[in-house]
Image (tube, helix red, strand yellow):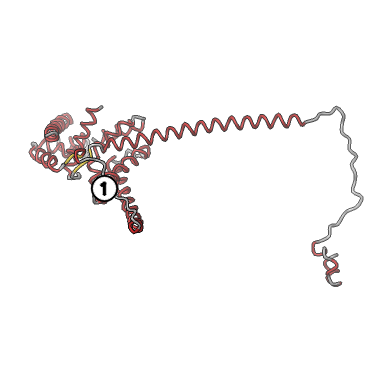
Amino acid sequence: MIDDDYKIIKSVIDGKTRDYELLVKKYQLRIISLCQKYTKNYHDAEEVSQEAFVKAFNSLSNFRFESKFYSWLHRIAINCSLNYINSKEKNREKETISENSGLTDKRISEESPDSYLELENLAEDIKATYDNLSTDLREVFRLSDIEGLSYEEISNKMNIPIGTVRSRLHRARETLLRIFNNKKYE
Amino acid sequence: MNKKIKYYENLGFIISFIKNEYPSKISKKFSDKVMNTIESNSEKYATFLSLNAITKVASVFVFAIITVYVLQFSENRIEYTGKSIENEYSHPTKNVKNESDDCINERKLSPGEKDTKCK
């Protein structure tokens, strides 16, 4: 997965801007969740996450391939969240003044409830499916996609050939993706 | 590409769920909004670059025209002559000593001061 990220970043730097969407899709939930811890509400978290992804894109040429892309993006998102908190405090002071003159600007979400995907039930189903995977499949999936280890590292750790790592990972992903797709459109 | 994007999105969802790092909901247009912002920024930057390039080329032309005009103007003012110019060198007849500032208002000074300042 880490190697995948590096390939995508190189392709984006080489001019294939649209490939960046793969990274956005992959990390959107984790970044929004991180920002929400700071902003305390979804709409602001979405806005801050959007800013973080755009900033990361603009600084992609400065990315050093020594660290994981997610760790780098995570730091950018935290900085954006802290900036948001600071600017919110300043805005609050201004709002206190404008409230007195009846000039408050309340933001209203333009999106209808249908344009959101509710995640709680979906997450519970996926977690249950993951827990029910065979130990071999679950362990390879955990080491690869959750911990971010390379095939070689997993092979050494579990004492199995790289080919077996690949096939187990493929089966684990396939099972989880099948359940996810079924539940997503229920 | 769409299939690949879908695959990454779904896998991203699964990883986030297992890691317990997900919000309660997500806008279906989130990634579109990010990509639209990036693309509109890129377009603005490209427009800025092309305008900048046009300005640079235009300024080079203007500078070249001004330079050519100035050169032609100065060439027209030069008058050539076939005669050699011979000026007699006039030696200064005597050295001139400037009055010091202190001595300018000589009349206002007392006799003692006049002697020291207007040597």
Asked which quadrant contains residue A175, the reply is top left
Horizontally, is A110 left or right of B66 in the view?
left
Q: Quadrant of the N terminus of chain A?
A: top left
Q: Please say if A19 is above or below A95.
A: above
Q: Nearer the viewer, residue B90 or A91?
A: A91
Q: Please say if A99 is above or below A80.
A: below
- Residue A168 can be seen in this image: no
Q: Secondary structure at mark 1?
A: helix
**Chain under numbered label 1:** A
Residue pictured at 71% horizontal, 29% vertical = B72
Q: Nearer the viewer, residue B24 or A177?
A: B24
Q: Nearer the viewer, residue B72 or A106?
A: A106
Q: Residues within 10 Å of mark 1 (few under 14, many from 20)?
A: many
Q: Nearer the viewer, residue A178 or A100?
A: A100
Horizontally, is B35 left or right of B98 in the view?
left
* Residue A48 in the image, given as x and y percentages of width and height: 30, 45
- The residue where tag 1 is placed is A35
* Residue B71 in the image, given as x and y percentages of width and height: 69, 30
* Residue A181 in the image, given as x and y percentages of width and height: 14, 32
- Residue type for callout 1: Cys
Asked which quadrant contains residue B67, the reply is top right
* Residue A167 in the image, given as x and y percentages of width and height: 15, 29
